[in-house]
Image (cartoon, helix red, strand yellow):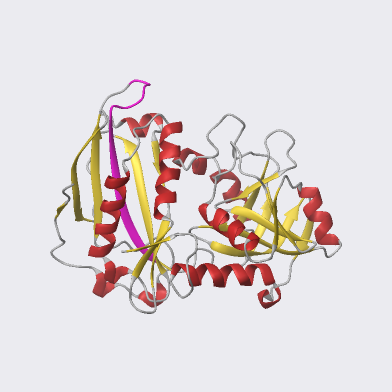
Amino acid sequence: MEIRIDRTSSSRLPQVDFANLGFGSVFADHMFVADCLEGQWYDLRIVPFGELSMSPGLSALHYGQTIFEGMKAYRTPEGEITIFRLSDHLRRLNRSAERLCMQAIPPQVFEEGLKQLVRLDADWVPHNGSLYIRPIYFASDDQLGVHASKSYRLIIFSSPVTTYYSTNLLVQVETNHVRATDGGIGYVKTAGNYARSLSASQRARAEGFNVVLWLDSINRQFIEEYSTMNAFFVIDDVAVTPPTSGTILEGITRDSMIRLLSDNGYKVTQREIAIDEVMEAGRTGRLTEAFGTGTAAVAAPVERIHYQGEDIFLSTDHSKWPVLSFLRKRLDDIRTRQVADPYGWVSVV
């Protein structure tokens, strides 16, 4: 498989302040692009990061066949570059593609294109932070009409980042809108799922919160996920997370944490958990930790949960949060190859 490489003539790396990266506002020098027409992949290339030229008739803009992933590369103390759970991210991307009637992406196209891109932009991987990798995949027919596209484009680009949430999570439980419904597309990573969350998120920010906690669409009682993350609660020394379903994204970080906890002597369970149960556990001191997990956020601690006029506050001394502390350190150690990786999660670039 041949990938054409067109290097940038002038790297933007010298202008980057790695001490003040933020999240997702600085982009590395190159991007990988591949096209597909009726199942045949062609014109695989790595080109300078830049603007796209497209027709107003692009079918993705009209009918929503657009999906994406989020994954990370890390720098080890020895200087190696690793990618965390690469094949699992491709598997989830293709699950999203199947639901939206899009052509599956062959592993050799995705994995080789991504690895060559990261090698080329290896200097963009921070020493303190990570390189966030964003594959996007969309329909590219230039034709109106509601039907599955015949052509698609895959683009992979990257951004050096630090922490997604710079403060603890201040959570507002959403009681008016719902994120997803049974039989819908809540379990896939498509742009529309995020678009429908924006109204509630904007309202929450105006009221002093930075995260929304979504409830189920039928009872408006069972917890689903946070704005951008899966949800964990430690109640009576047991880490509880809702089971993934047709309305909850199957988080890869979530899965990693469940496996790490269960394999290292911690109690963890996947079950339905009602917001009333969480609030009662908070009132009685049985809720000792709450956090969100995701590729961007990793493990973000909750400081406050607001529901129907009541607030639950958790300790901000995270050294006293044994579950969160363990997960953060063990996950970081595996990703940077400071401990053995018994799961085969890490790919060395």
Instruction: Name the residue furthest front.
Output: 342
Placement of 321 over or under 261, stated as above or below? below
Report the residue at 24% width, 62% height from top.
29
- Closer-to-camera residue (246/78): 78
Report the residue at 66% width, 56% height from top.
232
Residue 301 in the image: state x and y as whole percent: 63, 65
The answer to if 9 sits in the magenta stretch is no
Placement of 294 over or under 92, stated as above or below? below
Q: Which residues are magenta?
A: 145-160
Image quadrant assignment for residue 78: bottom left
Query: In the displayed structure, does residue 179 sit left or right of residue 288?
Result: left
Q: Is residue 51 visible?
A: no
- Closer-to-camera residue (271/218): 271
Residue 294 in the image: state x and y as whole percent: 53, 56
Residue 27 in the image: state x and y as whole percent: 31, 61
Placement of 57 over or under 348, stated as above or below? above
Query: In the displayed structure, does residue 39 sit left or right of residue 270?
Result: left
Report the residue at 33% width, 59% height from top.
158
